[in-house]
Image: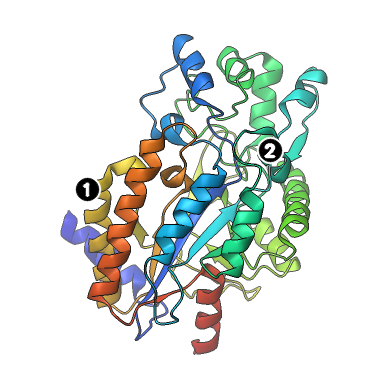
Amino acid sequence: MKLFRELKRWVLDLPSWRTHNPILTIESDDWGSIRMSSSQARDALKSLGHTIEANPYQLYDGLETNEDIDRLQEVLREVSGISGLGAVFTLNYCAANPDFEKIEEANFKRYFREPFHQTYQTYSKSQDVIEKVKNGVHGEVFEVQFHGAEHLNVNRWMRALQKGDKQTREAFYEGIFSPAIASSTGYTMEYMDALDYDNRSEITQQIQSLNEGLNIFREVWGESPQSFIAPCYRWGKPIEDFLAANSIYFIQGQRAQLHPKNEPGFSQRKIYRYTGQKNKLGQIYSVRNVIFEPSLYGQKQALIMAKQQIRYAFKWKLPAIVSSHRINYTSRLDQTNRESSLAALKELLHWVKNEYTDVAFLGSSALSERIKKTKR
Ligand SMILES: [Zn+2]
């Protein structure tokens, strides 16, 4: 079975873009999104009978703080690639969160969004995040890219709220939209996959949301994103048309794009991608081939997996494109979560540096430029 899996991976990578010099790109999703609002909210939901422990995202994934950005930067600056600068994190940003107060005021009849920079102002310890991230972008250890408007399937969530779904409402009153309780469907990402749909007619609204999200992104960061990563790797062709119309020509992803089917439920068809693949619009796909998620797998296991996958990538002259979500680096709910992930990250970066002295740390857009330049 393992041999079959490896053979499949090797075959799927055959047409991939290759590089003689090792390249390490770290892509980190979910920045700006609230997820679990606070440890008090988490405990309140627990006492209402919600199963919290089963899901690391409910235990650890809170909005990043000023200090989280400082600590991550410190670790990235400890190593330097051939450019002489630090390691680079691509921070994929969600541009908005629901505006809970306004939605409640409207008696759940209408959806309102709050731009993520306002969320930073309403949460404690996050007021300086934007300035700190901008410094990191300036210092070339961060790159900011687009992860959509809110990390939320607005239609499904609003329908559940309007129906008065008990668990969704309980989470709502704690400032949470992704309880992952999903008792009704058994699907834990119930409200997270923003661009999934039950009917194609929902796409127009999703594109409107993305458009608003893009405007917020541009306003805050002072530049347009060059790259997009779809929430939960689910998106369809019309989204690519929208991105191309907004000059976004680089699409981050995993091996399989999950294309929504035009039917109710959570069904998608898989489209296999490879790094460097180009579509008719001229957009280039990249495929994450390394998973580094200490908060999900534990420090030790996360390191074993990531080192193996990086070795494999470099052996076959593929760029190592690492998936490492915000959950690992946030301390809002649990300070030891951040510190143990950072210790693992530190070890990983030093290991890469020692094993591959000529490694280049590139953000996603720098990687895409490299691909474009050398594409046959
Ligand atoms: Zn995400």
Q: Can you name the residue that lies furthest to the right here?
A: 106
Q: Which of the 4 image quarters holds residue 355? A: bottom left
- Would you place residue 319 above or below residue 224 in this image? below
Residue drawn where x is 77% and y is 53% of the image: 211
Q: Position of residue 72 (x, y in %)?
A: 45, 54
For label 2, count other residues whose C-alpha is less than 10 Å away and answer few (under 14), some (14-19) or many (20+): many
Residue 29: where, in percent of width, then height? 52, 51
At 56% from the left and 72% from the top, the residue drawn is 365
Residue 195 in sight in this render: yes
Decide if residue 308 is on the left or right side of residue 125: left
For the residue pair 73 and 250, the one nearer the viewer reads as 73
Q: How many marks?
A: 2
As shown in the figure, which amino acid type bears the numbered disc 1? Lys
Q: Is 152 in front, or is 235?
A: 152
Examine the rendered structure and indicate whether residue 38 appears above or below residue 224: above
- Left or right for 234, reference 2: right
Within the image, what quadrant is residue 336 found in? top left
Q: Earlier in the sequence, mark 1 or mark 2?
A: 2
Q: Residue at x 54, y 87 (%)?
A: 373
Amino acid type of the residue that numbered disc 2 sits on in the rendered structure: Thr
User: What is the spatial separation of the Cα atoms under label 1 and label 2, in whole angstroms?
Assistant: 34 Å
Q: Secondary structure at mark 1?
A: helix
Is 239 left or right of 52, judged from the image as shown? right
Percent x, y of residue 69: 52, 51
- Viewer can see residue 146: no
Residue 300's tag is 1
Say whether mark 2 is within 8 Å of ligand 1. Answer: no
Name the residue carrying label 2: 119
Rendered position, 348 above or below 358: above
Q: Are marks 1 and 2 in contact (CB under 8 Å)?
A: no
Chosen colour scheme: rainbow
Residue 83, position as x, y percentages in the image:
45, 81
